[in-house]
Every structure is written in C-alpha cells, then in structure tokens.
Image (cartoon, helix red, strand yellow):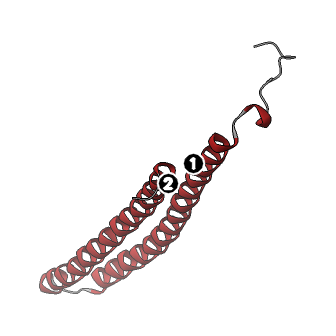
Amino acid sequence: MPENAQITSTKSDIPSGQQSRWTARVTTIQQAQRAIAAELILGATEMSKSMRTEAQLWSELLSKLAEAHSVKNLADTWGECGRHQLDFARRETKRWFKHGLHALEIATGLLKGAKRDATGPA
C-alpha cells in the first residue's frame, strides 16, 4: 500500500443503524478484553503470592530435614511436610482453575449479551 494512500470511507458513509451496531460490538469486545486482562492480572498476582508461600514451605521442609537426627525423624518429617506440600499444591491448582473459569464466564457472558443486543431481545 502506498504511503500516501488514505482511507476514503468516513463515518458519514456508514448508515447510522449499522454504525450503532458496529460501535456496540466493538465496545463489547473491548469490555471482554478488559475483563480477561483483569482476571489475568489477578491470577498472576495470586500465583506470585502462592509461589512465595511455596518457597517458604520448601524452606521449612529443608530446615526440618536438617534438624532430624534419625531415620525415623527423617521419615516422619518427610511424610508430614510432603502432605503439606501436596495439600497446598491441590488448593492452589483449584484456585487457578477457578480464576480461569471465572474469566471464561465473564467473556462468554459479555459476548452472549452482545449477541442478544445485536439480534434484539431474546
């Protein structure tokens, strides 16, 4: 495309009914993008917090293993801390999936609402 080429179509070339539908659709897509971005930011924040907690749990595990003076103490510590690690991982994974599901529901709801608006009342 030449550098000097200009778009010749203006807003006045588009019928007002189509323009308002087009504007509503673009607005809906922007809202869906904002909602998904907000959920991604929230999810990233939550993930960084959980990673920090996970690092603390590993640190505690290592210090408890270092304090163990017998094989029995090692086994007990490993079993107890291992359960804590797995419980934490299970809870966090569940929470991450909830964030993803929530973002999907928001975007789907916005798009379904836009479809209803474009076609008239449901």
Q: Position of residue 103 (x, y in %)?
A: 44, 62
Q: Nearer the viewer, residue 43 or 90?
A: 43
Query: Residue drawn at (48%, 74%), measured in percent from left and top?
Result: 49
Element type at mark 1: helix
Asked whether the beta carbons under mark 2 and mark 1 sit within 8 Å of each other, the answer is yes
Q: Amino acid at mark 1?
A: Arg
> Mark 1 = which residue?
25
The local crowd at label 2, few if under 14, some if 14 to 19, many if 20 or more residues have their Cα within 10 Å, is some
Q: Amino acid at mark 2?
A: Ala
Which residue is at the far right?
Answer: 4
- Look at the image and tell me in which quarter the N terminus lies: top right
Element type at mark 2: helix
> Mark 2 = which residue?
114
Relative to 122, does residue 92 appear above or below in the rendering? below
Relative to 80, does residue 49 appear above or below in the rendering? above
Which residue is at the far top?
Answer: 2
- Drawn side of residue 72 relative to residue 100, left or right: left
Q: Nearer the viewer, residue 44 or 65?
A: 44
